[in-house]
Amino acid sequence: MTAAERTPTALLGLDALKGDLADLYRDLHAHPELSFEEHRTAAEVARRATSYGYEVTTGVGRTGVVAVLENGPGPTVLLRADMDALPLTEATGLPYASGTDGVMHACGHDMHVTCLIGALKLLADARADWSGRLVAAFQPAEEVGRGAEKMLEDRFYERFGTPDVVLGQHVAPLPAGLIGAHAGPAFAATDALRVRMFGRGGHGSRPETTVDPVVMAASTVLRLQTVVSREIAGGETAVLTVGALRAGTKHNIIPDEAELQLNIRTYTPEVRTKILAAVERIIKGEAVTAGAVREPEITEIEAFPVVTNDADALARTTAAIGAVLGDERIVDPGQVTGSEDVGVFATSAGPHVPLCYWLFGGADPDEVIAARRAGTFERDIPSNHSPFFAPLVEPTLTTGVTALTAAALAWLDGPGHAG
């Protein structure tokens, strides 16, 4: 079968859209907005989806947008893209680099939005070829783990229907043109914690009169590094990072307190419970050992659940994507230690709503090959959240739009598609 013969009718209009989508992507990249501040992005999304014939609701979960297209009887398919940027200064030097100081689309959410907009246009134009209900969720605040929750608290299911499947994707430093999909636990759960450790301050020349929280915090950081290496089984996966340590204001002042911020990644409830208990034990134990004047405070900053892909649903979805892009372009990247809140749309809808969430490549394939040969991939290929992260516009957009469109058609009723 030739590529033309295996391409769904809905995708035949993609070539004519590429220029407009590229312009949209560059515009979104140049105008990033932080979590729950995605007003400009939401307005552009709403404008375009409305022009395609979707019923559009704005302000869902504060700044989210939901676009619905009713097209006869059939399944309800939910497509999701996140919209927010990061508090980061861009260093790519691109002509369309962020024009907002200290804010950057360093995780590719601008690409996610653009790909979903492209898929909505193609699916609207091909209404004669499918039947069902298409729901697109443009979600705010993924970066702080609150956007999906807020949309659901805003009566998402009651207003827009319970989906039969949840579909989504994330751009990654894979070679552009590839799709990465892993069945089962695919993205890690995250627990982000803030820890305040309390000492007794004083003059740097008289440490014997103080309880030094800097030493207390430093000792805690070192001890926390033993949790994964000494308390988690070798066959399990977990990550514990102390991303921030703040204490003091001047070289000769011993402060009253120190603050740590921790990031923990796990894939199973058992490992999560074990690692959180170990973290609490170590923090409190180090405080007691140091003679802290009061017990440390441990508070949650944010949390993301594990993203678990339904194996059967993922096989059905990737088969449809592979039928268009080529099966050789579908790879299994293994478990990703990054986190996502997309799974909440499926788990909150009921125990039998499957989730399919995949990666699509955005890195220059030649640069990836060269970096891997040189053993410098981690250094030379910018990852998500890097100030140098800049997906190729093409073929990244084409791959992302194609994957979302083909995946949706795999679940909607219609000629040649399972329903």
Image (cartoon, grey):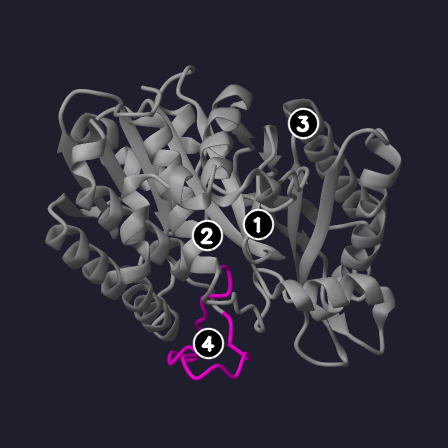
Query: Which of 295/49 is in front?
Result: 49
Q: Residue at x 40, y 79 (%)?
A: 96
Tell me the residue that label 2 is attached to.
399
Instruction: First in sequence, mark 3 or 4: give its number.
Output: 4
Disc with the residue nearer the chain's start (2 vs 1): 1
Q: Residues within 10 Å of mark 3 (few under 14, many from 20)?
A: few
Comparing labels 3 and 2, the label whose residue is closer to the camera:
2
For label 3, the residue is 273
User: Looking at the picture, which amino acid does disc 1 mark?
Assistant: Leu
Residue 173: x, y in percent? Answer: 61, 58
Q: Earlier in the sequence, mark 2 or mark 4?
A: 4
Using the image, tell me which numbered label, if any, was put on residue 102. Answer: 4
Q: In the shown orientation, is residue 225 left or right of residue 309?
A: right
User: Which x, y percent locates residue 58?
Assistant: 17, 49
Which amino acid lies under the numbered mark 3 shown in the image of this protein? Thr
Q: Secondary structure of the magenta portion, mostly?
A: loop
Q: Which residues are magenta?
A: 88-107
- Which residue is disc 1 drawn over? 178
From the viewer's perspective, is residue 161 above or below residue 61?
above
Is-magenta flag for residue 105? yes
Location of the C terminus by quadrant is top left
How would you rate the neighbour count of disc 1 (Cα within 10 Å): few for under 14, some for 14-19, many for 20 or more?
many
Q: Amino acid at mark 4?
A: Gly
Local SS, label 1: loop
The answer to whether marks 3 and 2 mark residues whose Cβ atoms lie closer than 8 Å is: no
